[in-house]
Amino acid sequence: MRSKITEMVVVFAILVAAVAMWFVADKFPNSMKYARIDSDFWPKLVCGALAVVSFLQLLQQAVGLRASLQSASAGTRSSVDPAYVARLVLIGGLILAYFFALQWLGFVIATLLFLWAASFATPYSNLTAKLLFSPLFTFGLCLFFTRGLSLPLPRGQGIFYDLSLLLY
Amino acid sequence: MLDSYLSALGYMASNPFTFLLIIFSVVWGIAFGSIPGLTGIVGVALLIPFTFAFDPIEGLLLLGGVYVGSTFGGSISAILFNTPGSPEAACTALDGYPMARKGQAGKALGIALAASAIGGIFGTVVLMVAAPPLARLALEFGPPEYFALAVLGITAIASIGNGSVLKALMAGLLGLGVATIGLDPLTGMPRFTFGSMMLLTGVGFVPAIIGIFALAEVLQRFGEGPQKGYVIDDVSTELPTIGEFIQTRITLLRSSVIGTVIGALPGVGATTAAFIAYSEASRWSRHPEKFGTGVPEGIAAPESANNAAVGGSMIPLLALGIPGSATTAVMIGGLTIHGIIPGPQLMQTNSDLVYSVFIGMMLANLLMLLVGVRMARYFALVLKAPYALVGPAIVVLCMTGVYALQNNVVDLAVMLVFGVVGFAMRRFGFPVASFIIGLVLGPIAELSLRQGLMLSDYDVTAFVTRPIAGTLLLFSAASLVYGLVGQFLRARRKLNGDTGPDTSEEAKA
């Protein structure tokens, strides 16, 4: 039941967003040369169609929800596993932290820390592998990108930028 | 023509170094194709300076081999890690990864490899025998034809996946909507950028697909925790048997034709070819509801199409001097380094070079079969490592590859956003394939529709009265009706509780 309601909320959000984007498109600056096929021509078509389809989907879900409320199975409760949510939040948070760390600390330090944190946050018993994998992978990849391919890697800011310059 | 081929063969036979170059380039291409973010374009671009050291034929053979190898290489990581190594392989992940999850990773890789080789050989044969006339046909394509081609792909959105048609349409429309972000291709006005300079160039396709596939997969796997059923540790690439090959022959042929034709169209490329071939394979399948769950046709169609598009994209390059794809545009750089200007005169003035390239590409496709089997096996070793190490490494690889694309942190942010979008789409049952088709075909559909309307003085009938556009639109309408009627009949059968014969058996019959 909860998942059906969540899904309805998502579809409703898409419907609202589609309508809002239609109005945003309506405000696009006009061009005399392309008056009949201006910048808003295609986005309005797409947003309009999306709004109509989302509305139909919402209606379909509302009918389904009503039917399931009336049925005997309405009493059953579906629950979200808290451990699942916790793991998801943890890895999501780590990836987000890694994204910011790449800009501040540079590739090497950020990647070392991220790989260690992620491997220790997940159930895996081989401590040696956890400890060795992070530096080996980080320096291997750094060498491959910077020396082998001459491709750029984030260098970080301030003192970390200077440190990165020493390495690549 | 025969004399030219014999002369080119003679050159290659007397210069065994060319074979070594082809082997090296295929391996290099597969490696670049399989690493997310690096793609074949980077692989080709990095080798261009080295072609200085070789003669023009050797240089072009090197670049051609990389192009062939990289187009297949993307499918390895797409199948094993749900992380398309290159945009062309995004579609392969849709059925390749589910098949790998069923414990058939080796088989999925084998199908991808065989389909790639067949598509590649088909595209090369067409290139060898019909490059000039096909190049002229490609030039007949104006905005109405491009629009009709995009419509052909878009009309499959509703029939993809085994879930709700409305959700598939929503996903497709969302993809079309996301594709409108950035500068308007006609007027140059910013759209949906909300004042952000970073969004002016639009949403990068590579960061978006890596986010949708790879990052969403990592989130999903970590969220669900360690599960034994997920371990894909027994991978020995199995090429399809003759029987399996015969079963997918129509898909392979159709997709190879689609790939070659779309590849020959300037500016469209292998990614579009793969998605249109996948759409058509799903539409004409007797069991379209199984697409996305790990069916062989879902791998064979995009792989044969994207590799056929390699040969296809060389057609306008060699016959007209117009690049058919981003990679061939980079290859022009390699040719001009040696003072060779591709164009209509090339076949007369440099016939040895042109025919050696044809033969070299044919060899590269055959070698890919041998090299691909070995390389996929080495890649599979990674699967033996625990996901606690592999998962974060995939995140790092994706971040590094995407950053290296343009030395741009915005691409990383796009990847993260689309990672969440991909995760949410899976969670709420929206087919990712429809979204990606919308994202790929949206810009082509929009631009060609608006250009076509402008050129025809807003006369919509111009889209149906032109022979190629009209035929393509008629074909789209017919296949849409066919797909919808099929869905309706299946739904009615389901409602009546008549499960009917197993669809897979139907396909075998």
Image (tube, coloured by chain):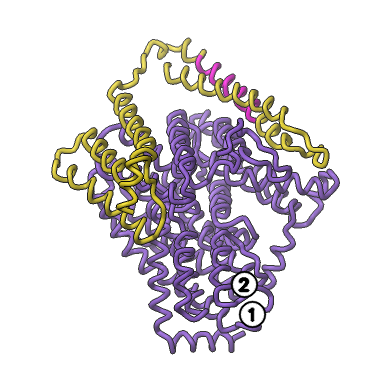
Chain colours: A yellow, B purple
Q: Chain of mark 1?
A: B
B186 and B348: which is toward the camera = B186
Q: Earlier in the sequence, mark 1 or mark 2?
A: 2
The answer to whether any part of residue A60 appears in the image is yes
Q: What residue would you read off at disc 1? A: B347
The residue that appears at 43% across and 33% down in the rendered structure is B423
Mark 1 belongs to which amino acid? Met
Residue at figure coordinates x 48%, y 69% from the top left: B48
Give the spatial CA distance, label 1 vs label 2: 8 Å
* Quadrant in which residue B101 is drawn: top left
Give the numbered dot on residue B38.
Answer: none
Q: Residue at 51%, 69% (x, y): give it.
A: B121
Q: Is residue B189 magenta?
A: no
Write down the quadrant of residue B171 in the picture: top right
Badge 2 density bin: few <14, some 14–19, many ≥20, Cα 10 Å: many
Residue B11 picture location, percent across and down: 49, 87
Instruction: Read off the magenta span.
Output: A50-65
Instruction: Give x and y (percent) for residue B303.
Output: 48, 57
Residue position for label 2: B318
Give the side of residue A128 with respect to residue B282, left or right.
Answer: left
Rendered position, B137 above or below B77: below
Task: Using the image, name the chain to which the residue with label 2 belongs.
Answer: B
| Apparent side of residue B384 relative to residue A147 in the rendered image (left or right) | left
Q: Mark 2: which amino acid? A: Leu
